[in-house]
Image (tube, rainbow, N blue to C red):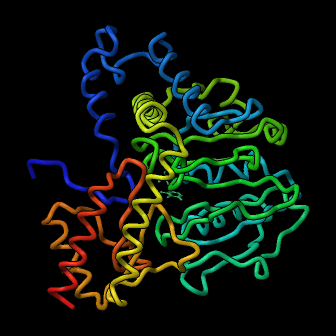
Amino acid sequence: MTERVFNFSAGPATLPVSVLEKAQAELLNYKGCGMSVMEMSHRSKAFEGIINEAEADLRRLLSIPDNYKVLFLQGGASLQFTMIPMNVLPKGASADYILTGSWGQSAFKEAKKLGSIREAATTADTNFNRLPNPEETTLDPNAAFLHFTSNETIFGVEFQDEPGTGDVPLVCDMSSNFISKPVNVSKYGLIYAGAQKNAGPSGVTMVIIREDLLDRVPDGLPAMLDYKNLVKNGSMYNTPPCYSIYICGLVFKWLLDDIGGLDRIEALNREKAAILYNAIDASDGYYRGHSEKACRSMMNVTLRLPSEELENKFVKEATAAGLDGLKGHRSVGGLRASIYNAFPKEGVVRLVEFMNDFQKSNG
Ligand SMILES: *Cc1c(COP(=O)(O)O)cnc(C)c1O
């Protein structure tokens, strides 16, 4: 390969070329510091500027209200599966989890090790191809929080709106559709997202937490797992993932300045997803989407072909044609096209052309 491919990877995933170019230009000598961001002290003025600007830009992008704290943490979204119940599930209380896929299941499994956790709904019976209807959801009005996964990356199922909770704080794993569209942050108690799907490289996880939930943090937690301690230290209790934070900051600037904000990126994402789903629906059943139409993900498009043999052939030939990373996760099979913010529309058009040609030759 001498050129960049169209990278459909589910994560780590494609980044905006202009961000990579900016990082390249600043690699050896960041803004006259005479060193790269990788080499500078996290206590330096230059890095202080980088992390403060990244936070300010994220706040602007999502219109995060002042009574929310923003953290840049390590350990991936997966560590939040543990930290959330540790910090905001008081002793003796119970929390509700809505399970719409593997990530929600993992969050549920980890939380159960730490307290009383209830399954409020699950769609495991149909291999997570849909969202639960209100009739099959039982919410505990006294729950400490309700956890859900706004977009299940593996199955390609996305909430179109927040589940109703009354006064119960909503906690959301937004890893794979974070900053893909505007979100009303004030509806949430806590939002978390690993960066490597939509916001930057791996190594950093954003946590947005409403201040009053910090009052729940029990004394005596290990310092690295204690939200209150991490907030107090401005995400720098220890050395933060400096370079990952820097790249996330560039991505936030790209969204604000080049794209024009989250309304605009949502429109672009909707357009890309529609091109692909329309091609699936127009294929006379040759391509079959995994998720029900009303729950289709704008970010991860999951589909099957008439046979596993054809699916393998498709992936092999697509890869050779510069359409990379299309093999689906083993729990769904088939193909998965992840088309996050930075994935270009041109790549979706190329995939649809490839799909049409493949169907003609193998129909
Ligand atoms: C990728 C992903 C995770 C896991 O993220 P890590 O950073 O690898 O821990 C969790 N939840 C969702 C929805 C994801 O897409």
* Residue found at x 23% / y 80%: 312
As drawn, 351 above or below 77? below
Closer to us: 312 or 66 = 66
Instruction: Judge left or right: residue 247 versus residue 230.
Output: left
The answer to which quarter of the image holds residue 41 is: top left
Instruction: Judge left or right: residue 282 versus residue 295.
Output: left
Q: Quadrant of the C terminus?
A: bottom left
The answer to which quarter of the image holds residue 168 is: bottom right
As drawn, 77 above or below 29? below
The answer to which quarter of the image holds residue 353 is: bottom left
The percent coordinates of residue 96 (x first, y second) are 77, 65
* Residue found at x 54% / y 70%: 157
The percent coordinates of residue 86 (x first, y second) are 73, 49
* Residue found at x 33% / y 59%: 9
Figure label count: 0
As drawn, 272 above or below 187? below
* Residue found at x 70% / y 25%: 232
Closer to us: 251 or 75 = 251
The percent coordinates of residue 30 (x first, y second) are 33, 16
The percent coordinates of residue 219 (x first, y second) are 81, 37
Closer to us: 285 or 307 = 285
Q: Residue furthest left?
A: 2
